Image (spheres, rainbow, N blue to C red):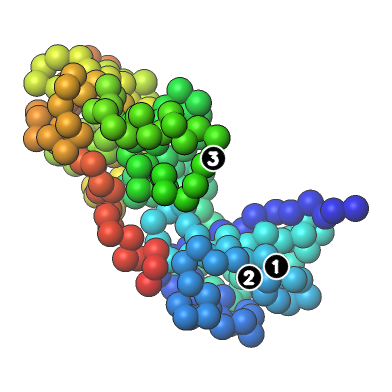
Amino acid sequence: MTSAYVVLAVMGPRARDLLTRLTKTPLDNSAFPFGAIREIGIGTANVLAARRTYVGELGWELFVPVELASGVYDLIMNAGANVGARDGGYYAIESFRLEKGYRAWGRELSPDVNPFEAGLGFAVKLDKGGFIGRDALAAAKSRVPTKRLLSFVGLSPDAPLAYGGELILRDGTPVGEVTSAAYGHTLQSIVALGFVKTEGMTPENLPGSKFEIDIAGQLVPVRARLKAPYDPTGANTKA
């Protein structure tokens, strides 16, 4: 019978230092590059470690057999006691992933959104031969999208908190809706993702417009971005 797994995420600038204390597997970039998956030993557990992150920092997701998860968790927390290891809750992760511009299934992504509308065209490879949906993707790529996902950051640290579902206005005209929002502690203001109508504008020209988010009747000025507000080049995740 296949074991059930618990996912423990070790994220942050000291993630490599912490895990190096627990495993003999080399964790440097040459041996364990970003995106790689390796089996590593932690205590008495064989753990499947994936070099990826949902918070925009260096990190690994550890797939641990459920019966060994509490022991691995204790080892991680004990080893990280003097480097500031702390538990992270859902809302902290939500804040981090929005600062990094990571999309979430069911919010930003659905069967009704194509990759070019979601800003994920870089992940589409049309030159790898035939595959289901290729013609539809090629057609979508050839035209200006009717809507585009943008990142938004409040211009003031005192901006009220958004939660998702708020109206987005461009130059005073309603053009879309916030899909996800939180307070960005690194950016020190609200941070959000949302789709806006392009109305014939190319995505590259959208951030030059004046954007506001209607939060409980208050029009909050925000800056729009095509790329992630935090670490847009991904240097931290690949450190």
Question: How far is the residue under mark 2 from the one under mark 1?
Answer: 8 Å
Looking at the rendered structure, the kind of residue marked 1 is Val
Measure the C-alpha gap from mark 1 to mark 3.
33 Å
Q: Which mark is residue 12?
A: none
Distance from disc 3 to disc 2, alpha carbons, whole Å, reads 29 Å
Q: Which of the labelled discs sits on residue 131, or is there none? A: 3
Q: Say left or right for 208 vs 23.
A: left
Q: Is residue 162 visible?
A: no
Of all residues, the one furthest to the right in this rendering is 1
For marks 3 and 2, the one nearer the N-term is 2
Q: Amino acid at mark 3?
A: Phe
Question: Residue at point 17% right, 31% down?
Answer: 202
> What residue lies at 37% left-to-right and 72% top-to-bottom?
239
The residue under label 1 is 47
What percent of the width, then of the height, locates residue 14? Answer: 44, 73
Residue type, label 2: Arg
Furthest residue in direction front, as rendered: 129
Number of marks: 3
Crowd class of label 3 (few under 14; some 14 to 19; many from 20; radius 10 Å): few
SS for tag 2?
A: strand
* 156 versus 87 height, above or below: above
Residue 134 visible at all? yes
Q: Judging from the image, what secondary structure is the residue with disc 1 in?
A: strand
Who comes first in sequence, dot 1 or dot 3? 1
Judge left or right: residue 153 versus residue 92.
left
Q: Nearer the viewer, mark 1 or mark 3?
A: 3
Residue 38 shows which numbered tag?
Answer: 2
Q: Is residue 95 left or right of residue 219?
A: right
Residue at the (36%, 21%) spot, across then down = 165
Q: Where's residue 110, x and y in %?
A: 49, 28
Q: Position of residue 36 (x, y in %)?
A: 55, 67
Q: Residues within 10 Å of mark 2 (few under 14, many from 20)?
A: some
